[in-house]
Image (cartoon, rainbow, N blue to C red):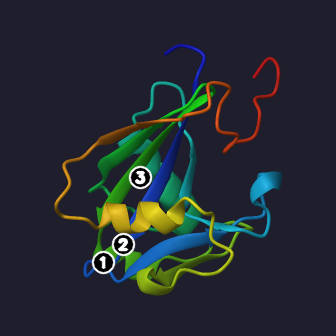
């Protein structure tokens, strides 16, 4: 699918699945002040699992290698790879950039959380599912869940 931008959304859970690492976003503009999972754009020729490892290391200061792709969201404009890891390293997350990183209780996600996390978090913990799940946006023009691409990017 040439021309699509690829992103990774990394859901890092404590081993008991009771807490998840989240970030209070300052960027991009549409997420400012909201809370989302860790993650970002995939680098050229980088896999979603490698991107999750890199993004979590950069944003939360922990190196986690045990990622599983649980969902791939196909949209007219982008592809979102949602990955999950259950690791003791989740207890060590810390703020590494200008965006606060913290552990949140999965049963009581913060009010400012991005809406999709309200179903992605429990889905990631569902042991009755076979991953990865593929979801396609119903809107042929795109869901609008990312910033519009900058021309020439």
Q: Are marks 2 and 3 in contact (CB under 8 Å)?
A: no
Q: At numbered mark 3, what does the secondary structure look like: helix, strand or loop?
A: helix
Residue for point 37% across, 68% down:
122
Which class describes the residues within 10 Å of circle 2: few (<14), some (14-19), or many (20+)?
Answer: many
Tell me which numbered mark, 1 or 3, is placed earlier along the sequence. 1
Q: CA distance from mark 1 to mark 3?
A: 19 Å
Residue occupied by mark 3: 53
Q: Position of residue 57 (x, y in %)?
A: 49, 60
Along the line of sight, the residue nearer the viewer: 69 or 134: 134
Residue occupied by mark 2: 13
Along the line of sight, the residue nearer the viewer: 82 or 153: 82
Tell me which numbered mark, 2 or 3, is placed earlier along the sequence. 2
Q: Residue furthest top?
A: 2
Residue 131 as seen in the image, left or right of residue 59 = left
Rendering quarter of residue 23: bottom right
Q: CA distance from mark 2 to mark 3?
A: 14 Å
Q: Is residue 121 above or below residue 84?
A: below
Q: Quadrant of the C terminus?
A: top right
Q: At numbered mark 1, what does the secondary structure look like: helix, strand or loop?
A: loop
Q: Are marks 2 and 1 in contact (CB under 8 Å)?
A: yes
Residue occupied by mark 1: 17
Q: Position of residue 45 (x, y in %)?
A: 46, 25
Residue 51 as seen in the image, left or right of residue 26 = left
User: Which label sits in the foreground, 2 or 3?
Assistant: 2
Q: At numbered mark 2, what does the secondary structure look like: helix, strand or loop?
A: strand
Residue for point 39% across, 75% down:
90
Q: Position of residue 104 (x, y in %)?
A: 50, 82
Which class describes the residues within 10 Å of circle 1: few (<14), some (14-19), or many (20+)?
Answer: some
């Amino acid at each position: 699918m040439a021309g699509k931008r690829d992103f990774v959304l990394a859901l890092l859970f404590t081993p008991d699945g009771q807490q998840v690492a989240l970030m209070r976003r300052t960027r991009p503009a549409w997420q400012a002040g909201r809370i989302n999972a860790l993650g970002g754009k995939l680098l050229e020729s980088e896999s979603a699992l490698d991107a999750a490892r890199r993004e979590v290391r950069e944003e939360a200061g922990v190196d986690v290698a045990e990622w599983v792709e649980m969902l791939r969201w196909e949209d007219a404009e982008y592809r979102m790879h949602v990955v999950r890891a259950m690791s003791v390293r989740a207890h060590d997350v810390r703020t590494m950039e200008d965006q606060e990183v913290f552990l949140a209780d999965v049963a009581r996600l913060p009010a400012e959380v991005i809406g999709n996390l309200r179903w992605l978090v429990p889905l990631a913990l569902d042991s009755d599912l076979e991953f990865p799940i593929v979801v396609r946006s119903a809107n042929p023009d795109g869901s609008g869940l990312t910033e519009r691409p900058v021309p020439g990017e």
